[in-house]
Amino acid sequence: MLVSYHRVDELGVITINNPPVNALSHGVRNGLLEAITKAQADDSQAVVILCEGRTFVAGSDISEFGKPIEAPSLPQVNAAIEASEKPVIAAIHGTALGGGFELTLSCHYRCALASATVGLPEVTLGLIPGAGGTQRVPRLIGAQAALDMMTGGQKITARKALSLGLIDRILEEPVEEAALAYARELVAGGTGPRRIRDMSIPADSFDGEAFAAYRSMLGKRKRGQESPQIIVDCVEAAMAKPFDEGLVYERACFVERTQSEQSAALRHIFFAERQAPKVLGLNKTTVPRSIERVAVIGGGTMGGGIAMSFANAGIPVTLLELNQDGLDAGLTLIGKNYGITVSKGKLSQEQAAARQALISGTTDYEALASADLVIEAVFESMDVKRQVFGHLDQVCKAGAILASNTSYLDIDEIAAVTSRPQDVVGLHFFSPANVMRLLEVVRADKTADDVIATAMALGKRMGKVPVLAGVCFGFIGNRMLRQYAREAQLCMIEGAEPEQVDGVLTYFGMAMGPLAVGDLSGLDIGYKSRQALTVAQKGDPRSYVIADTLVEMGRLGQKTGAGYYRYDPKTRARSTDPEVLAVIEEQASKYGVKRRELSDEEIIDRHLMALINEGFRILEEGIAQRPSDIDAVYVHGYGFPSYRGGPMFYASRRGLKAVYECVENLYNRTGEAHWSPAPLLTKLVESNQTLEDWMANKG
Ligand code: NAI
């Protein structure tokens, strides 16, 4: 029985029981409709809707999206509940999200435990509330608050919901007893149904100008995303149209959304994130090691952020630096970063202080003896890393996990300096480490299964998206990034200006263009790493001479006020710099490149194909477990637009044959080895298979 109905004295009680999260499947909708019909027929005075298990209805059944919806639909169920002649009260515990919260909006009163949260997160899946949310929420709390809630998609605590007017009462536990008492109170007071459909939004509360301003704000904050704008359309409709017409309008928009490309992409990413921590072939009985104390070596850019990530998850951290000055600098920076979070209102002073108190400093390796996990984040140099791991091998307890945050270096070589290579793993965080969600977990040759299982569990505990990678130069993300960054350089020397390259890619949806990213992180980083390479290792000079020349001119990026662009010292606003254009032209003529006009389409294709072709190689070599893992890496670590689903999803949607032809054309035109179509791509196209077919065959 997914939904049951029983009487408790003068009250009718409808109970939903569809574990694990009481999703609104077809069976639940059917059961609700039957139960509310039954309740109308007896002599109950009011009806309470509540849920068994750990939560109220946490949402619709996502597996039904994109398919024809079987009647009764949620709007039909909601209409029946709202029409009830007896007051209907929703009693919320856990979370009431999406369709689950819309269900409560069709009830006449809403009460919730203080620990409960509510929200309409549809926008995060490229959807909109489709069962009355966009029509009822503005009637309840006004257009502005409704727009903020629905375009933001965030969860709202019960107390906040009460203050906004989304719910009517906070309950004490246990939820059922308290909800029934509330219902009896309403009955005793002679309170009848109160239908949101009959409420009106103050007509002057949000006018045409306010809507236009809201749209333009969303255009910046949610650049490229369709759903937030459609939510605005629906709220406008709520103000302009009678309730039933507004509902019809909303439903049509919702159905269109479920079939949209953006929603398909966002749902793909939703599942990709949940799949990624699952390690194929790992014995299910593998028990993760317990991690209670962590140490981080190196308090620079990454070490500080990594330490904060652990403290944010409530795990005590010891930070080790070379000397007291380095340590002081690292700890001061951490304090400053927490200060910024407090000033943005994201943490209270007390919360920030409690987290900071979990981070202690040392310059003595002996202090690491009790750590369950040590993460090294020192300079990117094999010699330095080997030295650090040698020390760790001497002081760390047996069973401690020894991890490196290296961006490119060979984890096997690092592991080899220890007497315990089975305990060594790569844990590659992304900058800023306390913000970015991606965590590449790099499995070396001898890494033990329980170390991998621990890393995955820990990543999830920290709110990260852990993705398994194999050892190679740059693992998944940075290995692909090299190909992408090379195209940015080549497009410049062949004829594009920095602004065109960055403009086209941000228009596509990348968080930033590749050249602006270079200016932000510092052009000296790439320069230094190239200095360590031989001429042959550096490859085609056209792919780095512009960058090298700029560095040699002292243009290191934002920190020196100039890189590919010039930066205003006060506002940091960037502008085109004729000096850079002169450098590009000079280098082009030096290397015999005849500059020409590049179309936007060519620029976008070259960058995406560079990622995709390398992605296929990475898959075939087993460096990534699945195409969706690569997508999770790019969305969570490299600013790839989630509404495009990641590079491999993009490739699938464009069609592997079309991708192959594009890569092959580039190969034929340039003769460059890196453009030779990846063998896996070729194989799939020749056998007319998709990436899903390939995954399925892989088992
Ligand atoms: P950084 O130069 O900001 O910090 C390195 C810190 O390590 C310095 O504070 C230095 O004093 C300390 N250090 C050096 N040798 C040490 C030793 N033997 N013992 C203790 N401390 C020592 O460098 P950053 O950017 O934090 O990079 C660290 C590692 O993280 C590198 O392997 C880098 O490739 C990797 N990484 C960097 C990312 C970035 O965006 N900066 C992103 C992901 C990984």
Image (tube, rainbow, N blue to C red):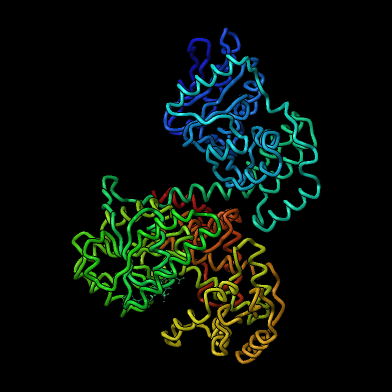
Residue 307: image quadrant is bottom left
Of the pair 643 and 207, the residue shown nearer to us: 207
254 relative position to 648: left or right? right
- Looking at the picture, how far across and down is residue 24, in whole percent? 53, 30
Residue 444 appears in the figure: no
Q: Which quarter of the figure is the N terminus placed in?
A: top left
Residue name at image x 38 percent, y 58 percent: 311
Residue 74: image quadrant is top right
Residue 36: image quadrant is top right
- Looking at the picture, how far across and down is residue 167, in whole percent? 58, 32
Of the pair 570 and 208, the residue shown nearer to us: 570
Task: Tell me: residue 614, above or below residue 558.
Answer: above
- Looking at the picture, how far across and down is residue 561, in whole percent? 60, 81
Residue 298 appears in the figure: yes
Task: Tell me: residue 215, above or below residue 469.
Answer: above
Residue with the most extreme bottom position: 590
Residue name at image x 66 percent, y 43 percent: 145
Residue name at image x 32 percent, y 58 percent: 316
